[in-house]
Image: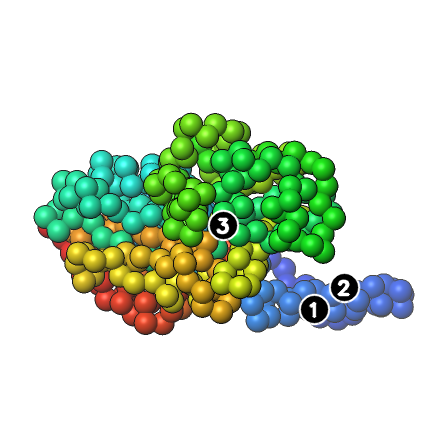
C-alpha cells in the first residue's frame, strides 16, 4: 500500500509543549497520539501492505518480471475452477501478463485451436488422429500436442433427499441413462444397496447438450466396462436416440439436477456440491466412492497412446482396472499447445504458463481450488520437457 505524506514546508511546526488548560485535554491529546502511533505500527507491520492477500504480495515482489503479453485459451468447462486458480497465481508471479480462458466445452476448444482462433485449448479428450493432422495448418508442420494438466474424477451425482451415497455397477448406470431402469427402488439398484431404504421415485437422467470431453470419458467408461449394456461407441456428443433432459456444461447439468428431485447426471466432481449424492462404483469386488485419490490411482494404470510423438503425452486409461482404491471413471483433461507459434512473445508466454500449470505449485493450486488429483512427479517432469520444446516458426 502506498502512503501519502504531507509536506511541512511553509507551515508552522506544532509546539511539543503539552496543553495546560486542563488534565482532560492532556488525557485526550495523549490518547489520540497513542492511537495514531498504534495505527502507524499496524499499517507498516508485516504483510499489512497487501490487504488483498498472498497474491498481491507476490505480485509486488515480482513486479520486475520481464515476461509480458497475453494469450487466449478455450475449452473444457471441467477446468473452470482450476483455470481461475492458475490464472490468479500466474498473474502474481508475472504481473505484466494476462491469461484469458473461455470454458466453452472441450469440443469448442479443440475447434478454436484448429481454426487458429486461440493459443491453446483445454480438452477432456486428447486430439484424435484427424484432428492432429488438421492442427498442422494452425500450428506448423509438427502440429499440436497434448499435455495432461488436470486429473479429476467424474461423479455420477444424484438428487434423492436423505441419501448421500448409492452403490452401482457400470451396467446399472448404463441402464439408467438408456431409460431401462426408471425408478429409484428398482430391484437392480436395491440388490446393491440392501442397507438403504430407496424411495418410490422416478429417475430423471440429465446429460450434456454440448460436445463434451466429460461425456466422452463417461461413455468410454460405460462402453469399456459394460459393453453389452452400453453398445454405443465413446463420443463427446450424447447419443441422439436416447433423448432425455440435457444442459450445457458441467455447471449446467449440476444446476438442473439440483432443482430436479429424482434426477441423476454425470459431471466433473469439482462441480458437484456437498448437498448432492454421489455413486460409489463397483471396481472388482468393492464399491469405490468418488475421490481425487482414487482418480490418481486409476491414472497410474494408464498407458501412452501409441503412434504419437514422444513429447505428446496422450494417455489411454484402463477403465477395467481392479487396482485397490482405483476410481476408473476419471478424466484426464489436457492442455493442447502448438509446437510452434508465429511470434516469440507468444511462444515464451505459452511455455512459461504451461510449465507453471504442470509444476508442483500449479498442481497444488488446482487441487485446492477444484478437488483435482495432482499429476505424478514423473509425469510432471515429462510434461515440462515437452513444453520446453515449444518454438517460433
Q: Is residue 235 above or below residue 39?
A: above
Q: Position of residue 323 (x, y in %)?
A: 45, 68
Q: Secondary structure at mark 2?
A: helix
Residue at 20% x, 49% y is 144
Q: Position of residue 317 (x, y in %)?
A: 35, 58
Q: Is residue 81 above or below residue 236?
A: below
Left or right of residue 259, residue 298 in this image: left
Residue at 27% x, 67% y is 382
Q: Is residue 118 above or below residue 147?
A: above
Residue 11 placement: quadrant:
bottom right
| Tag of residue 170 | 3
Tag 2 residue: 32
Residue 3 placement: quadrant:
bottom right
Lower sequence index among marks 2 and 1: 2
Camera-nearest residue between 347 and 74: 74
Q: Are marks 1 and 3 in contact (CB under 8 Å)?
A: no
Tag 1 residue: 38
Q: Position of residue 262 (x, y in %)?
A: 65, 37
Lower sequence index among marks 2 and 3: 2
Lower sequence index among marks 1 and 3: 1
What is the CA distance from the residue labelled 1 to the residue labelled 3? 64 Å
Label 1 or label 3, whichever lies nearer to me, is: 3
Left or right of residue 137, residue 229 in this image: right
> Label 3 crowding class (10 Å Cα cut-off): few <14, some 14-19, many 20+?
many
Residue at 84% x, 67% y is 26
**How many numbered marks have been drawn onto this rendered protein structure?**
3
What is the CA distance from the residue labelled 2 to the residue labelled 1? 10 Å
Q: Secondary structure at mark 3?
A: helix
Label 2 or label 1, whichever lies nearer to me, is: 1
Amino acid at each position: 500500500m502506498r502512503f501519502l505524506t504531507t509536506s511541512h514546508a511553509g507551515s508552522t511546526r506544532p509546539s511539543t509543549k503539552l496543553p495546560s488548560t486542563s488534565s482532560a485535554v492532556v488525557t485526550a491529546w495523549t490518547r489520540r497520539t497513542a492511537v495514531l502511533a498504534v495505527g502507524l505500527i499496524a499499517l507498516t507491520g508485516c504483510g499489512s501492505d497487501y490487504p488483498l492477500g498472498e497474491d498481491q504480495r507476490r505480485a509486488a515482489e515480482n513486479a520486475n518480471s520481464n515476461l509480458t503479453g497475453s494469450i487466449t485459451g478455450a475449452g473444457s468447462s471441467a477446468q473452470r475452477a482450476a483455470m481461475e486458480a492458475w490464472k490468479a497465481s500466474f498473474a502474481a508471479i508475472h504481473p505484466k501478463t494476462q491469461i484469458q480462458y473461455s470454458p466453452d466445452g472441450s469440443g469448442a476448444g479443440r475447434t478454436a485451436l484448429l481454426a487458429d482462433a486461440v493459443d491453446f485449448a483445454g480438452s477432456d479428450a486428447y486430439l484424435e488422429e484427424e484432428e492432429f493432422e488438421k492442427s498442422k495448418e494452425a500450428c506448423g508442420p509438427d502440429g499440436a500436442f497434448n499435455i495432461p494438466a488436470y486429473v479429476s474424477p467424474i461423479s455420477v451425482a444424484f438428487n434423492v433427499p436423505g441419501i448421500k451415497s448409492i452403490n452401482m455397477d457400470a451396467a446399472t448406470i448404463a441402464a439408467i441413462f438408456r431409460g431401462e431402469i426408471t425408478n429409484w427402488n428398482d430391484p437392480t439398484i436395491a440388490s446393491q444397496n440392501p442397507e438403504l431404504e430407496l424411495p418410490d421415485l422416478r429417475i430423471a437422467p440429465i446429460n450434456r447438450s454440448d460436445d463434451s470431453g466429460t461425456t466422452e470419458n463417461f461413455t468410454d467408461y460405460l462402453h469399456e466396462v459394460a459393453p453389452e449394456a452400453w453398445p454405443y461407441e465413446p463420443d463427446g456428443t450424447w447419443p441422439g436416440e436416447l433423448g432425455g433432459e440435457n444442459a450445457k456444461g458441467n455447471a449446467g447439468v449440476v444446476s438442473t439436477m439440483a432443482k430436479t428431485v429424482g434426477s441423476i447426471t454425470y459431471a466433473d466432481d469439482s462441480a458437484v456440491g456437498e448437498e448432492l449424492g454421489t455413486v460409489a462404483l463397483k471396481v472388482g469386488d468393492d464399491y469405490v466412492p468418488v475421490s481425487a485419490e482414487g482418480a490418481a490411482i486409476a491414472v497410474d494404470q494408464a498407458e501412452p497412446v501409441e503412434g504419437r510423438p514422444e513429447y505428446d503425452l496422450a494417455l489411454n486409461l484402463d477403465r477395467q482396472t481392479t487396482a485397490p482404491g482405483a476410481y476408473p471413471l476419471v478424466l484426464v483433461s489436457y492442455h493442447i499447445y502448438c509446437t510452434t507459434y508465429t511470434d516469440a512473445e507468444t511462444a515464451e508466454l505459452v511455455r512459461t504458463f504451461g510449465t507453471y500449470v504442470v509444476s508442483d505449485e500449479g498442481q497444488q493450486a488446482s487441487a485446492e481450488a477444484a478437488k483435482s488429483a495432482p499429476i505424478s512427479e514423473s509425469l510432471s517432469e515429462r510434461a515440462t520437457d515437452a513444453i520446453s520444446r515449444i518454438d517460433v516458426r
